[in-house]
Amino acid sequence: MNRIGKLYFRYGTMGSAKTAMLLTQAYNFEERGMRYLCMKPIIDDREKDNVIRSRIGIERRCEWIYPTTDLYQAIKKHCDQNQMVFDWILIDESQFLHEQQVDQLARVVDEFGTNVVCYGLRTDFQSRLFEGSRRLFELADTIDEVKSTCSCGRKTIINARIDGQGNIVTDGAQVEIGGDDKYVALCRSCWRNRRIESANRNAINFDAGLTLFT
């Protein structure tokens, strides 16, 4: 095809308005009569309906991406059925994509000339790259950081997991869906300091428990 598309990765910490940006972009495409499709991995089960919803309350229907979904074939089927090619594909929570699914999106870009924009997190609560994010860093034509600010004034880079008392959680499964009740975006320095504070509190509580039994 003569069209030249691009694969974009726009990443940021939780609460950095990534989803709001995606939904605003979809609205603009609709206003301009452009052909687009919104998609989202089903692993994010906070929504019972197939919608992308932002923290500020705006939403739009989307298509689920299942772990077994072949994105190239799914998008090609859409195009064949409607005898058209999408101008844009918008994907929320792209960190949950499998490596092969990112490869499939790259194929959509190269063969159809469709622009694919993936919004997502860079790293998990332990500061480790997600599988989908790692592959997007490797393959994306354009990578943009959606910046947000920590309470101390520095840039947030860590999606810290917290417990019910606000202590930093350092162990557990990589994927645990949640919002402000389970996560807080922090800069690296604040994340380190809060981990030390949580460890000290746990040590004091442990020592106090031993005293009760002596």
Image: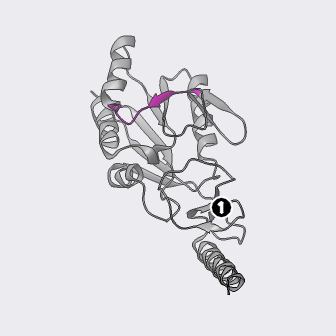
Q: How is the image coloured?
A: one colour
Residue in the foreground of this view, choosing between 165 and 15: 165
**Mark 1 sits on what residue?**
163
Instruction: Kindly identify the residue that appears in the image at 39 percent across and 49 percent down.
Output: 132
Picture coordinates of residue 94, whole percent (x, y): 46, 44
Left or right of residue 65: residue 28: right
> Crowdedness of circle 1 by 10 Å Cα count: few (<14), some, many (20+)?
few
The answer to which quarter of the image holds residue 79 is top left
Name the image quarter holding the C terminus.
bottom right
Name the image quarter holding the N terminus.
top left
Q: Which residues are magenta?
A: 61-70
Q: Is residue 106 above or below residue 79?
A: below
Instruction: Kindly identify the residue that appears in the image at 60 percent across and 29 percent down.
Output: 48
- Residue 87 falls within the magenta-colored stretch: no
Indicate the secondary structure of the residue bearing disc 1.
loop
Q: Is residue 206 above or below residue 123?
A: below
